[in-house]
Amino acid sequence: MADFEGRARLVGDDVNTDYIIASTRKRDTLDEQVLKQYLLETLDPSFAASVQPGDILVAGRNFGCGSAMEIAATVILAAGCKAVVAQTFNRTFFRNAVNNGLLPIECDTSNITEGDRLSIVAGAESSTVTNVTRGWTLSAPPLAPMLASILDAGGLVSFVRRSV
């Protein structure tokens, strides 16, 4: 289904959608190409400028809690991050991520450090996160077959277009 490799970018527990993109920024525009320059600015004002295409967000528990605005997932994608690895996700954010083509992977992130090189293999049969830097692999729950199909299509809109 999905194979990604990239640099780990750490955030903590309980990163809510207003931390991902501040409400004050959403008043001006909902264009993710504009908003990506403010990604996670509440937590670290320099974060967005340091993100590189292919980076992988790594979080603790309850990533994406708060409001159900899809823009949180699309801003992460616009910044060049194609996947988020977290111990747990807020369920609404998890589904918004899938619907927009952002890969959410749940596993133990406690031993991943900033800058580690990660390799993700995700699919309906199995999912793994390998820390290439440190030489270990974690199993992650496989994606439900329908979610894997939506992600394979690049998101829900593309999936529906292919299905009609």
Image (spheres, rainbow, N blue to C red):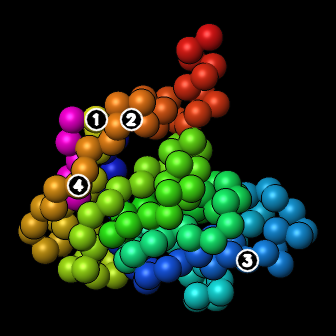
Q: CA distance from mark 2 to mark 1?
A: 6 Å
**Could you say which disc has been placed on residue 27 in the image?**
none
Q: Measuring 38% from the left and 35% from the top, which residue is drawn there?
A: 148
Earlier sequence position, callout 3 versus callout 2: 3
Query: Amino acid under label 2?
Result: Ala
Tell me, yes or no, whether the highlighted magenta stretch contains residue 97.
no
Q: Are marks 1 and 3 in contact (CB under 8 Å)?
A: no
Q: Quadrant of the C terminus?
A: top right
Q: CA distance from mark 2 to mark 4?
A: 14 Å
Above-or-below relation of 69 to 22: above
Earlier sequence position, callout 4 versus callout 3: 3
Above-or-below relation of 163 to 22: above
Q: Can I make out residue 78 in this image?
A: no
**Could you say which disc has been placed on residue 22 in the image?**
3
Query: Amino acid under label 4?
Result: Ala
**Could you say which disc has been placed on residue 124 in the image?**
1
The x and y percentages for residue 109 are: 27, 73
Residue 22 found in image quarter: bottom right
The x and y percentages for residue 1 are: 32, 35
Q: CA distance from mark 3 to mark 2?
A: 30 Å
Residue at image mark 4: 140
Earlier sequence position, callout 2 versus callout 4: 4
Q: CA distance from mark 4 to mark 1?
A: 11 Å
Q: Residues within 10 Å of mark 2 (few under 14, many from 20)?
A: many
Earlier sequence position, callout 2 versus callout 1: 1
Q: CA distance from mark 1 to mark 3?
A: 34 Å
Residue 83 found in image quarter: bottom left
Q: Measuring 57% from the left and 42% from the top, which residue is drawn there?
A: 99
Left or right, 162 with respect to 84, comes to: right
